[in-house]
Amino acid sequence: MLAATLVLGALVQGLVGLGLGLVAAPFVTMLEPSLMPDLMLWLAACLPVVTLVREHDAVDWRAVGWAMLARLPGTVVGAWLVTVLAATSLGIAVGLMVLASVLVTARSLVIPVNRRSLVAAGFASGITGTATSIGGPPMAILLQHRPPRQIRCTLAVYFLLGASLSLLFLGIAGELEATTLLLAVAYLPCLVIGFALSRPLRRVLPARHVRPLVLAVCAASALVLLVRSVM
């Protein structure tokens, strides 16, 4: 079951730039809560490598730079919250925040991609990505009006750097297990298969449908996080 969800999550992320955490994190939480957020962060750091092997020429490095600058303090806060705050409270707060952002931007409000918005998105995703393994929505919402290829490439670099940073600080906080890394390595073929399946679908997906899909994935991730936190 987990292997199938990882294939599906990698397929979704291959199409719109994010989705692995949305699809797989709830199943990991239900099957073995002790693997969270470690397992999903290891996988979130690996999948972008698969993406960047095929697509790496449309990265918005300026956006990545400013967002990563703010992700560092956000990651520190997220690692601290993992050790002191109940997962329920944090999950509910993050879920509501993402839903509110989706609702606002879905009504044709365009958030300018500038230094301030990138710093805010990077800080927010640092907290949510480290504490819940679902850190894509803040950046995805900000980049939703960009060309599909640029969204995928930019998010891939950002996820690679961000997940690695989150793992570093969780390791410093003593929240990582070596066995979880070995399990992530065992599941890597699922990511490759899912990404490979996304390639032919990408050719037939009209560019105008990518923005609604990005918002739908962000909203779904928020709902999943809310349900997971309450249950």
Image: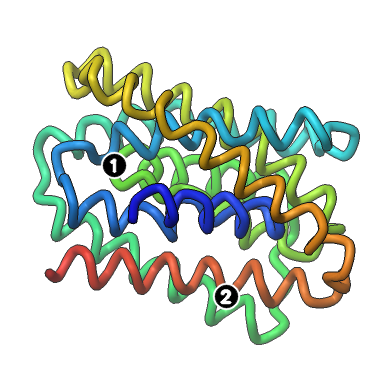
Residue 154 visible in this rendered orientation of the protein: yes
Q: Which residue is at a point 28% across and 42% down the rendered structure image?
A: 131
Q: Which residue is at a point 83% across and 32% down the rendered structure image?
A: 56
Work out which residue is located at the far bottom of the displayed protein and give it: 107
Using residue 71 as the reference point, say whether residue 14 is left or right of it. Answer: right
In the rendering, at what x and y percent does residue 160 appear? 58, 29
Q: Which mark is residue 216?
A: 2
Q: Do the residues labelled 1 and 2 touch (CB within 8 Å)?
A: no
Query: Front-most of 178 and 132?
Result: 178
Using residue 60 as the reference point, say whether residue 65 is left or right of it. Answer: left
**Is label 1 or label 2 in front?**
2
The quarter of the image holding the C terminus is: bottom left
Q: Label 1, on which residue?
A: 131
Q: Which residue is at a point 14% across and 70% down the rendered structure image?
A: 230
Residue 137 visible in this rendered orientation of the protein: no
Q: Is mark 1 on a helix, strand or loop?
A: helix
The quarter of the image holding the N terminus is: bottom left
Using residue 157 as the reference point, say whether residue 149 is left or right of it. Answer: right
Q: Which mark is residue 163?
A: none
Q: Say which quarter of the image contains residue 171.
A: top left
Q: Which residue is at a point 24% across and 72% down the rendered structure image?
A: 227
Q: Say which quarter of the image contains residue 78.
A: top left
Tell me the crowding category of disc 1: few under 14, some 14 to 19, or many 20 or more residues within 10 angstroms, Cα based.
many
